Image (cartoon, helix red, strand yellow):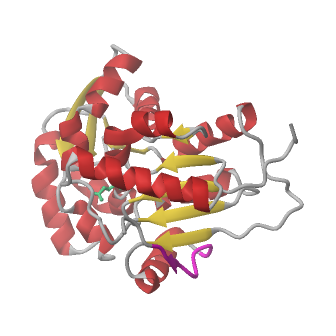
Amino acid sequence: MSFFDNRPIGIFDSGFGGLTVARAMIDLLPREEIIYVGDTARYPYGPRTAEEIGTYSHEIVDHLVTVEGSKMVVVACNTAASFSLEDLRREFDIPILGVIEPGLRAALRATQNGQVGVIGTVGTVASGAYQRAASALSDEIEVHCYACPGFVEFVERGDTGSDQVHVLAERLLEPLVHLGVDTLLLGCTHYPFLARTIADVMGRGVLLISSAEETAFDARTELLDSVAPRDPSIARQHRFLSSGDAQWFAQMGGRLLGPELVVAEHVTFGH
Ligand code: DGL
């Protein structure tokens, strides 16, 4: 076996949200090459059925593996991970990483009083994935899961700080403010883009946790344990694919991710 594996790492989400994970991956694994898919033609995933999400996830991972030759895939979408992570792991013989367990691990380390709020899409919360993963991980935390419908749409429109999004956050987070959680896990990869608004509403006593960094650490462990890193002497070129408007993806995505995203390519699924 060669010491290096120069294939890219695939990452996908319904849209811009997974860029929070891509950012952490690029920062922690600067020699690796990323290929990112934002399924913006079919976002939001939150209100979709388990079957639809299973089909979409399969199509995207199949593309990342068979067309793009990824050596590992990160499901940087809580909704997709909630419904299809186990199936994807059975279907594909490369490592497939999720975001739920890493996020919970980080929240478990952070909480002092064991009361952890989790916010996510309607689908993620209804799936019970966080509740199951939390009880498998520890009996020392109690998770309080709330859906935040509408947040994803604001981010996809490029609105991360308007009065409107603030009003919505006040309404959706109100029950959590009164629960006495000391930690709030952002259980949707879009939500870190709303961190300022969410923090304002929750108050200074509540620590916000994103799964992005912990997921990147998992990817690094996996690279060293069961795949192999990229040869650092070989140039790399991250690529960004969108099933929707590629120009908008590059424009808005570049603002959200940073200088690595200048150009996006269009990709089609499901035809
Ligand atoms: N970023 C996705 C998640 O983490 C958002 C899903 C959606 O498109 O509603 O769940």
Toward the viewer: 1 or 205? 1
Range drawn in magenta = 259-267
User: Residue at 45% across / 40% down in the picture?
Assistant: 88
Q: Where is residue 134 shown, x and y percent of the image? A: 34, 24
Image quarter of the N terminus: top right
Which image quadrant is residue 201 in? Answer: bottom left
Counting labels gives 0
Which image quadrant is residue 247 in? Answer: bottom left
Q: Is residue 262 magenta?
A: yes
User: Residue at 29% across / 76% down in the picture?
Assistant: 157
Looking at the image, residue 191 sits to the left or right of residue 241; the answer is: left
Q: Residue furthest bottom?
A: 247
Q: Is residue 227 magenta?
A: no
Looking at the image, residue 251 sits to the left or right of residue 231; the answer is: left
Toward the viewer: 132 or 205? 132
Q: Residue furthest front?
A: 271
Residue 100 seen by the camera: no
Q: Where is residue 14 shown, x and y percent of the image? A: 36, 61
Ligand 1 positioned in quadrant: bottom left
| 237 lies above or below 97 | below
